[in-house]
Structures are given as C-alpha cells and as structure tokens.
Amino acid sequence: MQSDPDARIELELLRLGHVVRVIRLAAPTVTLGRDVANTVVMLDEDVSGNHAVLTHGHDGLRIRDLRSTNGTFLNGAPVATEAAVVDGDIVQLGGTCALRIRRVAAPSDAAFALADLTAGTMHRIDGDRCVIGSGPACQVEIPDGPGFAAALSLADGEVWLDAEADAGPIAAGATFQVAGHTFRLEVVEQLSMHVTQGGTLTASPSYALSVALDGPGGPVAQLSDPRGTLHHTVGAENRATLLYMLARRRKEDLEHGEPEATAGWIDDEEVMIGVWGRAALHQATSNWSVLLHRLRRELDEAGFDPSIIEKRRGAVRLRLRHIELGGQATFDSHRPPAA
C-alpha cells in the first residue's frame, strides 16, 4: 500500500461480513489486542492481550504478529512474523476477529445530485444528508412510498446509502432501488441538465425524548412532539435500550461541545454489546439490522419521523436535542479509544 499524505487508512471490524466498527489509523504505529493499553482494543476472547502491530511508513502498511496464542492471518494465510498489507486485505486475529484494510481517498469538493430515473427528476443534495420517502422531512419525495424509505449520508468524501434492503457506500454513477424507484448518484459538475435545488435537512427534529432503564416494567422511552399532538411510548426492552444508548451518547457529546452535525455517533459493535451483552456479540450481528428496522417502523407508524435514527458505515446515531435520561446505565458497554 503506497504512502499517500492525502489519504487515510481505516480498519473495518467485520462480524458475519458486516462492518460493525470503523477505526481510523491516525498514528504510524498501531497496536492491536485485548489489553486496554493497546491503540485498538479488541473484545474477542481468542485475541491475545498484545496480539499484533500495524505500521505505516515509507514501505507501506505492514502487519506483525506479536507471538500471539491463536495467530495472525492475512487473507487466510498465517503470518509467521511480518507481512505487507494492501487495500482490501483481511487481517484476522485469532479465530473470530476479522479486520478489513481500507484506503480512503481524501475528500473532494464535488457536490452530488440524485437522479430519480423512474420519475425523471434530479435533486441536488445539500448538507450532509438526504432523506428519501413520503414524509414531511424528505428532500426527495416518493408520494406513494413509505414515510422513510432511505437516506444518503455524506461524510469524509463517502456517500453512504441507509436503506433496509440495501446499505453500503455508493459511488458516483451507481444506481440503486428504493420503494420501486431507481436512483443514480451523480456529480453535479458533470451534469449539463437543470438540477432541482434540494431542501437542507434540519439539524435535529424538535421532538422530545425521555428514556430510562428503570421503568416499572424495565427500559421505557417516551417520545413527543412540541405541539403536543403526538405521544408514543416505546416499551419493548431492546428498542428502549437502544434509544437510551443513542440518547445518552448524543447528550454527552453535545454537553462536551461536540458540534451538532457530528455529535452522537456510536459504533454498531458497542450498540450490540449494550443490547445483547458481550457474550452474545457474534450472534447479535444478524439481529441488529432487524432491531433497527423494527424501531424505525414503530416510530413511523406512531407518526414520528423515523429518520431521526441515522445509520452509516459501522455506526448509528440519534438526531435529537431535547433529551431527558433516567435510571442507571447497567448494560455492558465499551467505548474503545480512537486509534
């Protein structure tokens, strides 16, 4: 992997093929292992305390095994001592911890537009997010579609599609299906046709959320709108616990001065541990997307905008400002340090 001062290197932690955590490598030397003193702390039991080290220098990116108990593997082959790593390689620590190497190009200044090939319309994407559906907060309207059908999130030069049936990064020129419509992502500078100006997504809907872990029957969350016309209680334990975790991270970040545009992100892996526990981490991966879909559908059916829960590669957050927390956080949560 060639050194590029304008690019960054990321590790994608994979569970059953799904990205559950994205780790940016900011230092030239990054240690990996279960010991909390490592740059990147892994939770898998078969990962050694000090398992391996990644170095990024003039000769590219290299992985070195630190005499781990269960070994380090590169694309399935054991690493005896040290090996060169390139974009797309899979580094496995022990038997379960898989990390995909990802080289991310420097963000460009390009503006994007979304072509609805079914309706024959073009919509410019303004801000960091574009919501597709029939709800009032949607920038791209599908009149006969669900309130929230999908969303595109723009961050660090990447466009991420958040949809139930299709989630992942979208490249310029790529097409995808949402609610019976075919869309294509376009770069505005490449367009010669008229582009409809899209509306800018409000930073946070003005709903109020009160959520506690110690309700009479367990975790409970109550959502209301400022006009007093909508009230809804989320009583299912896993859904209320998810809202508590998202609300707590959002509230903490805002109180510590994090900009609203970036506050509240929490790794998928941390969410899964908080909801199902560390022991069930590997089994929880398949349940995570189901939980997110069911909570969004519940909010939509209650009349609330389900896009307040925002999803991107390996992370999720809640876009609200009016948050009240109650009870004690008793779930098994782990917030790893940044690399």
Image (cartoon, grey):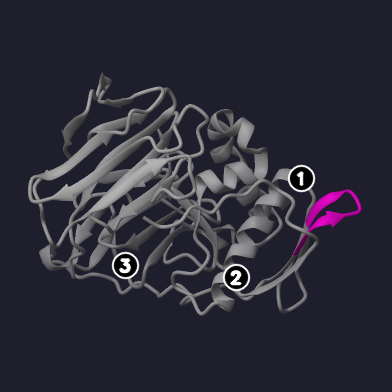
User: Principal SS element in the magenta part?
Assistant: strand
Instruction: Kindly tell me whether residue 5 is visible in this rendering.
Output: yes
Q: Which residue is mark 1?
A: 237
Residue receiving disc 2:
252
Q: Which mark is residue 155?
A: none
Q: Which residue is mark 3?
A: 125
| Relative side of 169 to 267, left or right | left
Whether tag 2 and tag 3 are in contact, CB under 8 A, the answer is no
Residue 104: image location, x then y, percent: 22, 52
Q: Is residue 249 above or below residue 174?
A: below
First reached walking from the N terminus: tag 2 or tag 3: 3
Above or below for 6 versus 81: below
Residue 209 % position (x, y): 71, 67
Viewer-side label of 3, 1: 1
Quarter holding the N terminus is: top left
Residues drawn in magenta? 211-220
Q: Residue at x 10, y 52 (%)?
A: 3
Q: CA distance from mark 2 to mark 3?
A: 29 Å
Amino acid under disc 2: Glu
Q: Is residue 213 magenta?
A: yes
- Number of numbered discs on residues: 3
- Residue type marked 1: Glu
